[in-house]
C-alpha cells in the first residue's frame, strides 16, 4: 500500500508480513507456513474491518486526498464509452484543472464537467493541483449552457481543495466567475447531478455544485473550508486539523444527516483507491438512478425543487 496514512500502518505491516510468508511458501512449501499464512490473513481481514469501519472525519479526509484515488478522468475512462473533451471559455483560454466535454453515460448522452488533479509533480503542475482558474468555471458554464440547449443532462464531478487563490485568478475575477455559476446553474433548464468524488473545498466546489442531486463518495468530504484552514483560524495552529474536521461535519455521513447531500456512493473497504473499477460501477449506477428520476419531472417542477432544495439548507427553528 503506497502513501499509507498513519492509521493504516498496522494494515501495511500485516500485508508486508503476509507477502513475506507467501514468498517463503512459494520457494519452500510447508504446512507450518501455510498455517501462518491463514492466521495472518485472518488477522489482516479483522484489522482492516476494525480500522475502516470506524473512520474518523479526519481519517476520511486523508483517504479523500489519497494519491491513488480515482480522479475525474479515471471515472470518465471507466464509465463513458465515448468522451469528447471541449476546450476554452471563449474569453481568456483553457483550464486543464477543469476538463469538460460530451460523453455517453451508459446509454445516455450527457455533458460531463469536473476537477482534475495530478499524481506526480508534472501532472499536478499541468492540472494546478485541481484548483481551477476563472476560465475553468466559465468553460464549465459554457458547456452547461450547451447541455441546456441540446436537452442533455449534466454530470459534475467535484474534487478540489478550492478555487485557485493566486493573483492572476483574482485579476481575472475568480469570485465573480463562481458567483455567476451559482446563479446560472440554479436556472439551467436541464437535470444536473453533482458528485463529490474526493475533496469538496469551499467556493471552488460550489462553482459546479448547484445541482438537483448532490452525491458524495463514501470517503469524500464537502466543506466551507479545509480542516487545516479552520484549525489555523480557530486554534491558531494546523495541528488541530483532526478536531476541526470533526467540528466541521464535513463527512458524507454527517452531511447526509444534516440534509446537505442527497446520497452516499459506496466505496470498497479502505477507499476507492483499492478498486477503481468497482467504485466506478457504483458511481455510474448512482448517477444513472438519479437521472432516471430527474428526467421524469416536468421542467417547472425540476426548477422549483432545485430552488427549494438549497433554500432549506441552514434553516432551523428554536423553541
Image (cartoon, rainbow, N blue to C red):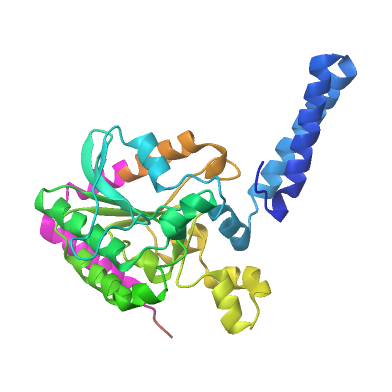
Please state the total of marks drawn on the protein image. Answer: 0
**Residue closest to the eye, 22 or 302:** 22
Q: Is residue 140 left or right of residue 298?
A: right
Q: In this view, does 72 lie to the left or right of 212?
A: right
Reply yes or no: does residue 310 show up in magenta: yes
Q: Is residue 159 visible?
A: no
Residue 14 picture location, percent across and down: 78, 38
Residue at 30%, 71% in the rendered image: 178
**Residue closest to the eye, 209 or 310:** 209
Residue at 47%, 35% in the rendered image: 278
Residue 38 picture location, percent across and down: 79, 25
Residue 109 picture location, percent across and down: 20, 40
Magenta residue span? 288-316
Q: On screen, 111 above or below 279?
A: below
Residue at 79%, 16% in the rendered image: 26
Q: Is residue 145 visible?
A: yes
Q: In this view, does 81 lie to the left or right of 44?
A: left
Amino acid at each position: 500500500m503506497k502513501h499509507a496514512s498513519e492509521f493504516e500502518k498496522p494494515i501495511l505491516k500485516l500485508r508486508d508480513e503476509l507477502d513475506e510468508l507467501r514468498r517463503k511458501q512459494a520457494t519452500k512449501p510447508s504446512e507450518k507456513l501455510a498455517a501462518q499464512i491463514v492466521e495472518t490473513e485472518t488477522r489482516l481481514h479483522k484489522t482492516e474491518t476494525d480500522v475502516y469501519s470506524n473512520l474518523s472525519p479526519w481519517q476520511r479526509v486523508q483517504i479523500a486526498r489519497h494519491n491513488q484515488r480515482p480522479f475525474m478522468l479515471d471515472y470518465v475512462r471507466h464509465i463513458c464509452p465515448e468522451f469528447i473533451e471541449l476546450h476554452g471559455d471563449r474569453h481568456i483560454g483553457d483550464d486543464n484543472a477543469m476538463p469538460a466535454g460530451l460523453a455517453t453515460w451508459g446509454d445516455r448522452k450527457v455533458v460531463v464537467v469536473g476537477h482534475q488533479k495530478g499524481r506526480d509533480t508534472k501532472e499536478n503542475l499541468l492540472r494546478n493541483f485541481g484548483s481551477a482558474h476563472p476560465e475553468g468555471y466559465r468553460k464549465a458554464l459554457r458547456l452547461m449552457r450547451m447541455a441546456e440547449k441540446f436537452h442533455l443532462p449534466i454530470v459534475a464531478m467535484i474534487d478540489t481543495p478550492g478555487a485557485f487563490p493566486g493573483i492572476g485568478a483574482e485579476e481575472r475575477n475568480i469570485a465573480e466567475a463562481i458567483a455567476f455559476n451559482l446563479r446560472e446553474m440554479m436556472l439551467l433548464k436541464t437535470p444536473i447531478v453533482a458528485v463529490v468524488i474526493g475533496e469538496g473545498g469551499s467556493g471552488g466546489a460550489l462553482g459546479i455544485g448547484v445541482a438537483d442531486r448532490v452525491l458524495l463518495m463514501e470517503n469524500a468530504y464537502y466543506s466551507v473550508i479545509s480542516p487545516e484552514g479552520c484549525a489555523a483560524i480557530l486554534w491558531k495552529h494546523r495541528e488541530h486539523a483532526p478536531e476541526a474536521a470533526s467540528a466541521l461535519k464535513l463527512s458524507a455521513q454527517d452531511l447526509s444527516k444534516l440534509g446537505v447531500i442527497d446520497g452516499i456512493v459506496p466505496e470498497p473497504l479502505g477507499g476507492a483507491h483499492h478498486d477503481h473499477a468497482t467504485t466506478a460501477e457504483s458511481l455510474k449506477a448512482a448517477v444513472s438512478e438519479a437521472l432516471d428520476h430527474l428526467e421524469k419531472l416536468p421542467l417547472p417542477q425540476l426548477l422549483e425543487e432545485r430552488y427549494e432544495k438549497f433554500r432549506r439548507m441552514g434553516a432551523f427553528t428554536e423553541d
